Amino acid sequence: MLDYMQFVLAPQMLNGFAFGIAIVLMALGLTIIFGLLDVINMSHGEFFAIGAYAGVVLLASGVNFWVAVALVPLLMLPVGVLTERLLVRQVFDSADRHTLTLLLTLGLSMIFYDGLKMVFGPNPLRPDNPIPGGIEVAGVFLPAYRMFLIFLGAAIIAAVWAIIYKTSLGAMIRAAAFDRNMASSLGVPVSAVYSATFAFGTALAGLAGILLAPIFSVFPTMGHEFIVIAFTVVIVGGMGSIKGAVLAGLLLTQVQAIASLIISPVWTDPILFGIMVLVLMFRPQGLFGRLGHG
Amino acid sequence: MADDGSVTTSAPRSAGATAAVRAYAQERIEWRALNIASIVFFAGAVAFGVAYGLKGDTFYLRLATEALIFGAVALSVDILLGFAGLLSLGQALYFGLGAYAGALVLKQVSESFWLVMGVSILVGVLSGLIGGLIAIRARGVYFALITYGLAQIVAKVIYNTRELGASDGITGIPIVNVSFGFWQTKADNPAGFFFVVLAVIAIIYLGLLYLSGTPFGRALSGVRINENRMPFLGYRPDRLKLAAFVLASTIASIAGGLYPMLRGFVSPELMYFDASTNAIVATMIGGTGTLIGPLYGSVILVFLKSMIGTITTHQIMVIGALFMIVVIFFPRGLLGYLREIVVARSRTKDGGGP
């Protein structure tokens, strides 16, 4: 029993935790963009994939992994700004904003997905683990890279929370999310805030991409695969809720990690989906409220 | 306008009645335009089938048959989006379930066209009930995401189920004999099977056209225009949406049942997101809420893909770009604009504007 805990359960939960942190980063981008702009970004998964591929390219061209981790989110910023300015804004004021922005970002995701396949080929790539090895604590082996991912990710999540709730920029974002017109007439540069937020969410997706690259492989359809779980997290946590994304992300990935010890990993996705359906039945708005709404 | 849902409560009753009459007249003109478009579509399809059948062509007839089959999936997207206002991102799920059911029936039970049709209807109704009961609990974007998730997950499970052929799918499906009593053909006869599929699609289309004019069809539009107002008129939006969902999944499943007869195999890709996306792209290109538009859109999309396919293997990129252009600049689609032009012309003919 103790052996099981030590060699099976604990490492599995730790893996789930590292994965969960990365999923939270991705879900945070989705939920902030939805909370502020009311836009479902279907290309968020592809932003995640682009981040991973950008990391692969940087590493292959000899850039140090740590520099790459810092560079990728910065490179993603213009992608986000351009998407928001050139695409989302085209249909933003339409009555069908929800549907049209969803369809538009869906089209964008098709282009990105096929583009990645064209440039990098369909086969998975995998960057080397930048910090191999690990340490043993109380008999449990802690892989160094996963520990690093957990600490860095947690720090970024804390930083996101601090930016949204403790800075004037965050106050502007929350104000614009609550009432765009009122915020605008009080002098909040709503248009710039929208672009900045979209870019910020995109950067988070790209960061999640490069951080997960050494653990999971990098492949063109990765965006499609990971966005399903990110959407599940965001729906369970509450669309537009930061707290919800963090808690639901960590919780659901633990459920997935532990369930895959008991049943075939193929069936863990239906379990997460079942949880999401249950949440929707009893709390359609998700566990927590929306950004800017209390 | 018939579609903006506004009711001028402050106007005198007679003015309101006149407005209603005018809205009704305009809608008649709109549907007349669409009916002409649908006659052109089906007449064109028959002419195409006869001409290419006499020529002994295989490639284009097969391609057109595929366009019609995918056109039915697009129709099912249009029922949900154009009428009930629900965007389904997972319509390929029901298409794929119908296709798998059809393949299994043909391989293991009986090589009967009619049995496949019956089973695919049954599969469509049952899976639509289950999927619908889950999905219609959610509104708006949540609905879209749930249909998406449901399709992804079922596809993944089937991809990993060895009994269903896993990633290879089911191959070696026998060639079906289709008999209508007075006339019969085989599924490997390109022209013959094209007409079989055309007949199925025509029946579905006419059925939907009829439904759109019934109280059920009108109530569905009511759900799209203002769901919150419907309960006050004595309707149950949930039931209407579920009915629309089951109807849509059944149509997609029937189309699925036809697919293994055409191609001789089924694979998990049929349920994937790309397949669902294609149905949405076809619907948007053709025009949502027009019924005939999605069929036009599907033909355009399938032939365009085939054309692009001779130049590059990266069709998805081109289709994605085309789709974005349609969403930004022509959100009403081909038939939507045609309808507008016809209405505008009839207005100038009458000498009166709105």
Image (cartoon, coloured by chain):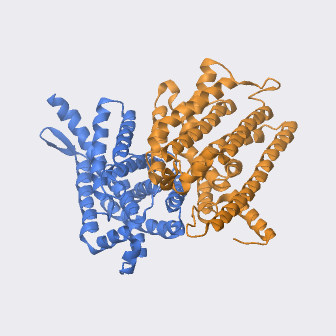
Chain colours: A blue, B orange
Work out whether residue A213 can be spotted.
Answer: no
Query: Can you give x and y, in whole percent of width and height, for residue A3 in the image?
Result: 17, 30
Residue extending furthest front? Answer: B13
In front of the other: B170 or A281: A281
A241 with respect to B102 (left or right):
left
In the displayed orientation, state which residue is furthest to the top: B109
Height in image: B217 above or below B181?
below
Give the residue displayed 36% in from the left and 34% down from the top.
A265
Quarter of the image holding residue B262? top right
Vertical arrangement, residue A254 with respect to residue B13, above or below: above
Q: Quadrant of residue A33?
A: bottom left
At horizontal 60% and vertical 26% (from top left) the residue drawn is: B119
User: Where the C terminus of chain B falls, by quadrant?
Assistant: bottom right
Q: Nearer the viewer, residue A212 or B203?
A: B203
Assign the N terminus of chain B to one quadrant of the image: bottom right
> Is B33 left or right of B259, judged from the image as shown?
right
